[in-house]
Amino acid sequence: MKKLLLSSLLVGASLLQVHAQGENIHEIEKKKKTPIKEVVNGFPKDYAEHAISTSFNTWLEGGDESLYFQMKTSEFLPTSIVPRRIPTMELEENIRPEIGAIEAETIFSGKKSLDEFLADPEFRAQGYLVIHKGKVVYESYPGMRPSDSHAWMSCAKPTAGLLVELLINEGKIDDSLPISHYVKEFKGTAWEHVTIHQILHMDSGLDIDETAETRANPEAFAHRYYLSEFNQPYKGKKEKFIDVMASAQPGEGSGKKFVYTSAHTEALVFLVEAVTGERWSQVFDKKVWSKMGVEGPLQVQTTVDGVALAHGVIGSRMRDMARFGMLYTPSWDKIAEEQVVTQETLDRIHNDMRSHEFLMAGEDGPVFADWLEAGHPTFAGNSRQWDVVWPDGDMWKGGMQTQGLYVSPSKDLVIVYMSTAVQDHSLHRFVRKVADSGLFE
């Protein structure tokens, strides 16, 4: 089997950040991390105080600070609570132990079964859930409780994409138009002629690349962007988030390569608010969350002036994240009062993909190369805030520190997983193994 070590590190950019700060992977691995099981039922006060006192870069490095940030995000940022509006629609269970025996070749530790991988605390896995035809068939919580809220990280990006899709369906957005047609703050800026369609596909062509190197570089847009987002000063001054967004500069131009950045997703947040005249979290409540029979609230973290950080800083119970994924499957009626994701929306995602070559040419393109190995269908490309779409119509969105949301409309299958791993992203390697196992035909 072809091993592509660096190519398999989703947000392996975190390693580049480490090098930029004068450390190497071995030094980072030696740093003490509290075993997740020791704090699964609660964190000591000094642990919490230390985590909150550190900078945003530390929250993203995978150590104890990251674990606290993932589990207690509302203590770091203002939070809009989207409550459960209708009675919980309980998920039936049909547990299939054979799923845990499915094996994948890990990055550093050879072949392991899913059960073995999740049981090893070194991998920092916190939860794994598989739902088939509306029933829970596999569920494991090695590092959290089922009732805990956990940050989705970039697995949240399809929430922003979905609201845009719904407004397109309603005739309120034309994605062929430039975003400045709707968002007045982008007039006269580098965003002015960038179309909504380009933004949906991570193809603005602006100089807004987001990697761990740019997040750590004080002169880079991504560094300034995150400081503003987390209300931390840039060169001694706290900046308004929309002002930072509007300051983006021209880059290579669109159509050349996938340029992964959360700024694209946040541009969609401003778009939804401009079109509806409402806060993003309120629109998501009305159009999506209130239709779902969830177990708990959705936490939407915001900037200090209330801009929803829908690119990744939202959180919920793991089962409720899976319920969101189920909106894209034939079993939507098992968790929602009405169909939110219509065939029209699915058709756009499946038929409007950017090419495989476009994706692989991008900053994060090589991280998807694990799915090129023999026996796995080559993915077709990226589409409308989903990182990867395969020829069979399956879709995947990954998140920093190895989160995952996998949806197969044809198999009526949803897989979600949560973790705080930045050195070893092997958890991603199981998702297609599970989906292609033959258990869900």
Image (cartoon, rainbow, N blue to C red):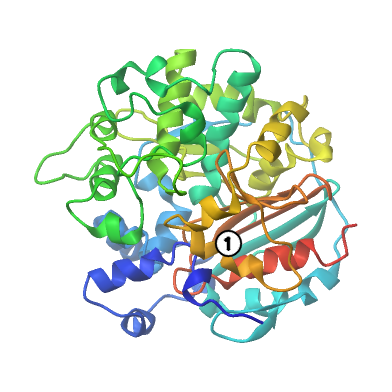
- At label 1, the amino acid type is Met
Asked whether the viewer can see residue 51, the reply is yes
Figure check: 323 above or below 140: above
**34 with respect to 380 (left or right):** left
Front in this rendered view, residue 352 or 17:
352
At a point 67% along the width and 84% down the height, the residue shown is 111
Q: Residues within 10 Å of mark 1 (few under 14, many from 20)?
A: many
Asked whether the viewer can see residue 49, the reply is no
At a point 36% along the width and 51% down the height, the residue shown is 210
**193 with respect to 272 (left or right):** left
Q: Position of residue 334 (x, y in %)?
A: 83, 37
**79 with respect to 89 (left or right):** left
Q: Image quadrant for the N terminus?
A: bottom right
Q: Position of residue 366 (x, y in %)?
A: 50, 64
Q: Position of residue 354 (x, y in %)?
A: 58, 44
Q: Image quadrant for the C terminus?
A: bottom right
Determine the residue located farthest toward the right in the rendered image.
Answer: 441
Rendered image quadrant of residue 245 = top left
Residue pointed to by mark 1: 144
Figure check: 309 above or below 272: below
Figure check: 211 above or below 170: below
Figure check: 99 above or below 253: below
Determine the residue located farthest toward the left in the rendered image.
Answer: 236
Front in this rendered view, residue 269 or 97:
269
At a point 28% along the width and 30% down the height, the residue shown is 190
